[in-house]
Image (spheres, rainbow, N blue to C red):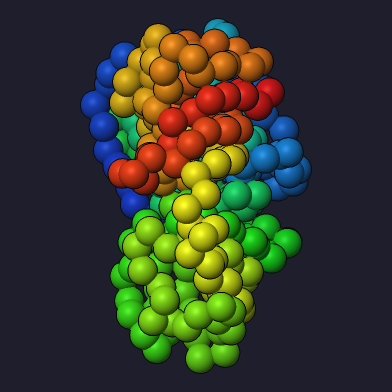
Amino acid sequence: MGMLILFRPRWLGALAVLTAAACNSSSVSPTVPSDPSNPGTAATGATIGGTVNSGGTTRMSTEGSGGSGLTVTVLGTSISSLVDSSGRFALNGVPSGNVQLRFTGTGTDARIVITGVTESERIQVAVAVSGATATIINIERTPPASTDVELKGAISSVRVGCPTPTFVVNGTTVTTTASTQFKDGSCASIASGRQVKVKGTRQSNGTVLASRVEIKEKEKEAEKEVELKGTISSVSVGCPTPTFVVNGTIITTNPATQFKKGGCASLRTGIKVEVEGTRQANGSVLASKVEIDD
């Protein structure tokens, strides 16, 4: 058994460990890791760094994958990192949500899941890998320094009612307390389809604790022009008129939709986009323009 590399956590995050058999995946262009103890902050997305202890039946090699023979990939994206000879790796720009990491190399194809990754979060993890099994030994999670949040959009669902409702806006769960201020309405105004503007604080689990909820007037609810910016979480229909999901909202396209900085073939899970379009009666958005962020 190889030596496990541990470090002192500031706090331990909830996580799930997934064991998977070897399978094929699309090719990626891995990058050499930076120091995982100070991986830096990506322009967008989270940062995941750490160390890998590879043992068991894994044969170590220096051919093409740093000094360890292993590559770490964020499944569903093109983000990857070589594991260096010290067992270190670093992944930048990781999308929010439940993130699955895949460790591949000679004799190795294993996966883990890190749940509830949030924008700009920094995560350090120590992983033991052997064959098709990967186990998280330790994890340290640091939420983003800036936690002030402003959300604007339609409520997609209400999970808890008055006096302190919990609801979802643009894929983000919003919670309230007795101190939350409601403008142009009350907690009884919180309902699916209602347009709101929320100001609050991002919590460590990714939810937003609202300090203020502004209820939009009925005439403003009729406005259908929508602008969305976020990461694609899934693609259900491909070219020439793709359908995909951003911030919990289904985006549809038609032959008139304009694509900027890339074509419809560029749309895939993990890609950041800006969408302009029209809200449909079923809550989806018909995109007039889709701009792919570099």
Q: Nearer the viewer, residue 278 or 252?
A: 278
Residue 189: x and y in percent read: 42, 76
229 lies left or right of 170? right
Can residue 117 be seen here? The reply is no
Q: Is residue 188 above or below residue 236?
A: below
Q: Nearer the viewer, residue 290 or 262?
A: 290
Specify the quadrant of the image occupied by residue 228. Answer: top right
Q: Nearer the viewer, residue 17 or 52?
A: 17
Image quarter of the N terminus: top left
Residue 283: x and y in percent read: 36, 45
Q: Nearer the viewer, residue 252 or 174?
A: 252
Q: Is residue 89 above or below residue 214?
A: above
Q: Is residue 184 above or below residue 287?
A: below
245 lies left or right of 237? right
| Residue farthest toward the left in the current orientation of the protein | 21
Which residue is depicted at the point 48% across and 57% down? Answer: 221
88 lies left or right of 221? right
Which residue is depicted at the point 43% across and 82% down? Answer: 187
Q: Is residue 215 above or below residue 83?
A: below
Residue 186: x and y in percent read: 47, 83
